[in-house]
Amino acid sequence: MGKTSVGKGIRGSEGRYGWTFIAPAILIIGVFLVVPIFLALYVSFSNWNGLGSPIGNSSLVGGDNYAKVLVDSGLAQRDFGTSIRNNFYYVLLVVPLQTALALFLAVQVNRRVLRGRGFFRTAFYFPSVTSSVAITTIFIFLFTASGAVNTLLGWLGINGPNWFADPSGIIHNLLKGVGVTSAPPLFNEGGPLGLTWWDWVSGPSVAMCVLIILAVFTTSGTFMLLFLAALQNIGAEIDEAAEMDGAGPMRKFFSVTLPMLKPTLFTVLTLGLIGTWQVFDQIYLTGKGAPGKTLLTPAFLAYDTSFKGLNWGEGAAISFILFLIIVALTLLQRYILRDRDTGRGAIRRAQKADRELHEEAARAAR
Amino acid sequence: MTTGIETVRIAAEPADIARPPARKVHLSARTRTTMLLSYLVLIAIALIYIYPFLISIAGSFKTDADATQNPLSLLPQTWSFAAYERLFTTVPLLQWTGNSAIVAIVVTFSRVFLDSLAGYALSRLRFRGRNVVFAAVIAVMAVPNVVLLIPRFLILKELGLYNSYAGMIIPLIVDAAGIFIMKQFFESIPVSVEEAARIDGAGVFRTFWTVVLPMARPALITLFILSFQGSWNEFAHFVISRQSTDLNTLTTGVASLTSGELGTGNQYPLQLAAAVLMSIPVAVIFFIFQRRIMSTSEGGEKG
């Protein structure tokens, strides 16, 4: 009837509008992201030396650039292995810490009874608004040998390390504490990517720990905002309903709030994982990988190899390996956190949990 | 059984008045302790977050020697404005600031508008190829920026945009993460509100502009803040998209200070002063919008 024809009209114009709405985004992303990626892909398989346009000024060399980084033992491979190890520990510590801290802070400052909520939100968000350049400059000042942090540690009777100049790994240091000062026989052998197993289990260096603290410090506020927006979108009604039905704070958080936050949690973990594998600015500012290359990351190594070492193909190859690592980890995480239905489904499940709570409370009251 | 449930309920409702007095006193004391503890924890965390900035501000007014010897103190032994004087005389800080402002303003407004449009299309408008486009957005989001440094440099050269404002701005006016955030948010808005507007005869763009966008205010503000912050603080892209020192932004300019291009010595006060000054605009933007962040979209579907 009339209704169906209207429906068809809407559907038809929807398609047109859909493409119109998304056209500017596609154009910009296409020209400045997709096309350049194919250029980089070409460069990663070529021997381009940086002169002229890569098209016409270079020839394909197959997988040589990738082999130099991944298979052929040598400096390139060892640097790449080192950068992967450094960044791995960085991600391993930063992502869980920043997510947990952001969620904790968001729940805290979202409380209705909290006094000075505005002050706390401002305090926690402020590090996020500062640029990596400004905050890294500040952290270099804070973590000098006789800097603010070591002065503070001195009051507690702790002799602080010379942070940014200390290349020793923290797991190595812990092992030293129990008397293991050098590699056990098995660990002295070659592990992957030209590093010994002993090198692989070093843990983040003391210098890297500063960057880990820096990352958690600067990102938790941003992610707190994302969680906060989602918490506010849940609204007070469901929250109050859960409380009314007798859910304690913990139960309410895990059975009602957290399931409804799942889409945001996915966003935060995804952005965190992608962001932490791209750490670049801080490395650029703190001495380009020093001390002892323990701050070298694949992102910085790619830049350095291309722009400074002029091995453009190798640099592009490192970039693409990094790209694959990030994609693989994102997909893996998506698979682990998969859900039949997000968004409205999460609300439905939360309501179901709410109903169950209600029934439970009713039974108990009887 | 009953007591168990009762305890849970009371813990969740500290302000309930209709409770027998004896029990109320006992439990509110417990609640008060919990409250006090959580305040102490929050205050301690807040101090950790704020103190580095206070030290930096104080440090920028110290002499080089004072900053090195008394890094923790919030009061300079002798007030020195040498760092600021140098920033405004020998260092072209004002020019850097102007460049940062031009880039950030254009990028922010374009990004909020274009990302919302795209996010809305991906979450609500059914069109052929939508899933492919969304998959592409996810893929694009996963592309490390560093992969793009070399090719973007080439593209900009190829298009004649290298070393120009256009080259610094245009590649940044759309970002996949923003599209993703907007899409996720639009999906959390109930469809019923839009359907009502559509049934009333509003067109797609009008529904989007007058009904959906106002409801998406929390996400828009978040995106505005993230975009301004992102473009004001962008560093790597400006390293590869320009060469002229006249196009230095605050980030590339201050980075040259931090990496010690202005002579020897640690010069901490100078670096801290630059770091403090470049943080002011983003801080101001945050303070302006802070109250808006706290307002919620609660009750959007009450009617």
Image (tube, rainbow, N blue to C red):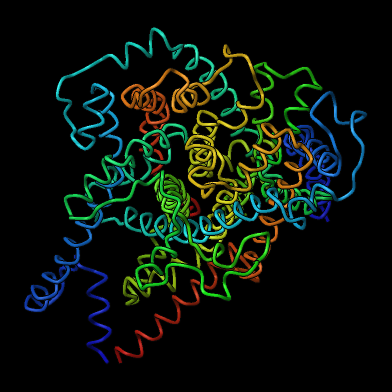
Spot the residue most to the top: B89
Residue A50 visible in the current orientation:
yes
> Residue A245 occupies which quadrant of the picture?
bottom left
Question: Horizontal and vertical percent for residue B1?
Answer: 27, 92
Residue placed at 19% from the left, 68% from the top?
Answer: B16
In this view, B250 is above or below B44:
above
Q: Residue at x 36, y 73 (%)?
A: A178
Q: Quadrant of the C terminus of chain A?
A: bottom left
Left-right relation of B93 to B180:
left
Q: Residue at x 66, y 24 (%)?
A: B241
Image quadrant containing the N terminus of chain A: bottom right
Is B160 on the left or on the right of B182, as rendered? right
- Residue in the image at 75% along x and 37% along y: A311
Residue A224 visible in the current orientation: no
Return the residue nearer the eye: A241 or B220.
Answer: B220
Would residue B278 appear left or right of A195 to someone viewing this image? left
Q: Position of residue B254 (x, y in %)?
A: 46, 24
In x, y percent, where is residue B177? 62, 45
